[in-house]
Amino acid sequence: MKKLLLGNYAVARGCYEAGVKVATAYPGTPSTEITEAIAQYDEIYCEWAPNEKVALEVAIGAAIYGKRAICSMKHVGLNVAADPLFTASYTGINAGLLIAVADDPGMHSSQNEQDTRNIAKAAKVPVLEPADSQECIDFVKIGFEISEKFDTPVILRLTTRVAHSQSVVEERPREEVLFKYKKDIQKYVMMPAMARSRHEFVERRLKSLKEFSETLGINKIEQGTRKIAFITSGIAYQYVREAYPDAWVLKLGMVWPLPERLIKDFCSQFEKVYVVEELDPFLEENIKAMGINNIVGKEIFKLTGEYSPSFIKRAVENNEIEVPYKVKQTLPPRLPVLCPGCPHRGIFYVLSRLKDVIITGDIGCYTLGALSPFNAMDSCVCMGASIGMAHGISNASDKKQKVIAVIGDSTFVHSGIPGIIDAVYNGSDILVMILDNSTTGMTGHQDHPATGYTIKGEPTYKLDIVSLCKALGCVAVEEINPYKIKENVEKIKQLLDLPGVKVVIAKAPCRLHRRYKFTISKRYIDFEKCKNCRLCLSLGCPAISLKDKPTIDANLCLACGMCEDVCKFGAISSQKEQ
Amino acid sequence: MKKNINILVVGVGGQGNILFSKILGEVLLNAGYDVKISEVHGMAQRGGSVVTYVKAGEKVFSPLVDRAEADYILAFEKLEALRWLEYLKNNGILIYSDYEIPPLSVITGAYEYPDVEKILQTVGVKACRVEVKKLLSQLGNSRVQNTLMLGFFSRFLDIDEALFKKSIERNVKKEFIEINLKAFELGRRIEMCEVEK
Ligand code: SF4
Ligand code: SF4
């Protein structure tokens, strides 16, 4: 039966059909649904790891033991996992190992736009790039075959518009695959003597992969009727096809290593060939390096952001689209905001009222604290960076500058812990605020080691962040209720003045999490008592807006009570007036 | 030959436009079209402006709809209808809800919520306004705007009503099927606007 399937779900389906036994990941948009969907299959062991490096190590172990394994992450996650990747390229695998990496051209939800093909090339592993959901299923299977045939990890590169698009697929049954574990020190123990010969192996492997790519069916020429030609892959292929249905297209399913003869033959038939790829000129540079010069690439196609069919058409034909309906005035922007009832709101409200403090931020929902109305964040670099940066800033100021690092619970487990160890060890004076909402909020409520639940929702040992921070040597570790704004202002000021590394854990579950039930008593504003000072508006709660005076929309209010704490005139309560 | 249909579904994160697109996409698939849907996830969902594309045709390549390419824009929020208007093709139809969700920039007083009706008139676009607020209060449920809009929109497509209902039944949680079907029917019975097909 034909059905519509999200690209990420199709990757999961492909894994099921390919007999995968182990799946690991740390959640990250746009890759998250791969592992969530795999968790629905009882045949596959599946886990959230604390970070991508650990996730990949688990998958490498499983593959070497003889079980097909997949590890999924977003592009920035591959930086974290780069260390094991580069050496797994040397050891090779036993049963197949696939690493699904989702790039995010256009940065819909990422801190940078990076191109995974560069890391894959540096690690000397092959890369497959599907262009729709059916290819996601097919390429997973081909990926495992290549992985096993050439003894290599294989990267499946997705981009947002493949990962998060639904297109038509046909599902097939699962096939079990069997491999046995064999102890092999020469292959799996990478100390210099053995690694040297493995490096030779890696270079030979790349050569045979290149040879193989010439005849690999997913690198294919589609004949056209018009004398215009493209080399492309992945989602860019779809854009080209739509813009130029009658063009010649060399569609590359494997984008590293490249089929040199096929490309040379193709290019020799045309006066010029357009190379269309989002992000870096990866294909372009590697094709030029083959000595082919009749290609046109980044001199007309942009290096940043997403492409589209009309973008390609405009670039090739050098013209503009005409827009029939246009609104002339500037519209009010609608930026993302913390949800109504979000526990982070109270903390950022307090932080926005502190003077002369630098606040280093981190990756998660709470990154939104950097935006209006709080503007309470000075930096946001990568997972776990807040703590190290806070320590760096404090040191650079000879400890004169007060610094607060803000990090979520999931991010703290991901890579915040070593930062604390460093700060304590080096006698830092920073305050670390762990905003513990008992989940991974931004990516859609995934569990992690401090929630006490596995990816399948089964109860497990719950990492105790308080005792952990004490054990790491922090001088003060306190839990606070983020909704108690008045109390928290004082508490945070006091702690900020103490020497040493202090930790405040602002603990309250995400208001939108299915697991937690809240006793709801919505808040209302008593217009008699309201002095129209509008202080409550500075909370930035989407439920409170300004009519003549501030008003609370009962449809949106999640009854967190924070506004009641902020109003100086006692105008807000759970009593509905009139 | 199935003719190509490009649809933009716009609104505010959390309004259910991914579910709407999924239901509509399945209807189109079962009606014999090739279909692609492109969704938005991540930061944009936290109350930001979001867009989802639904494309159907004999064969669909790109999942994206670009400026001046949409046959229909379905806006679940009034201001968002304006924001995405450039995506409408010449003689395309805008179907928008009268629902207003002021963005933070309006709440804090930095901007004013624009007079959407007036602007649409000056732009001169074919637009149908759906009195969602009134209809939802009739239903006594504020969370079925998407199926209500689907009911209205279903009349623009030459597709059997039963396919819509089946797709709703398959995609919403059991306990909400009834109310969603009711919303769909209510939407389908709304008096047609002037730009009727
Ligand atoms: S904080 Fe209290 S008094 Fe001030 S505007 Fe809000 S409700 Fe009115
Ligand atoms: S209106 Fe007040 S009680 Fe309701 S969610 Fe917003 S801050 Fe919390």
Image (tube, grey):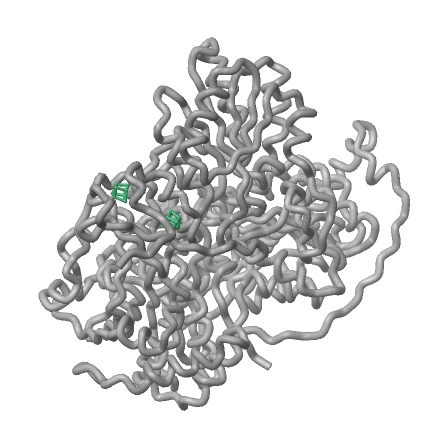
Choose between A318 and A66: the one closer to the eye: A66
The relative height of residue A91 versus residue A515 in the rendered view (above or below) is above
Quadrant of the image containing the N terminus of chain B: bottom left
Report the residue that reaches farthest toward the left. Answer: B122
Q: Residue at coordinates 47% horizontally, 81% vertically from top-left?
A: B178
Choose between A453 and A278: the one closer to the eye: A453
Q: Residue at coordinates 82% horizontally, 53% vertically from top-left?
A: A66
Q: How many marks?
A: 0
The relative height of residue B134 versus residue A323 in the rendered view (above or below) is below
Residue A397 in the image: x percent, y percent? 44, 12
Image-quarter location of ligand 1: top left
Q: Residue at coordinates 31% horizontally, 61% vertically from top-left?
A: A310
Quadrant of the image containing the C terminus of chain B: bottom left
Choose between A126 and B143: the one closer to the eye: B143
Residue A314 in the image: x percent, y percent? 28, 58
The relative height of residue A147 versus residue A476 in the rendered view (above or below) is below
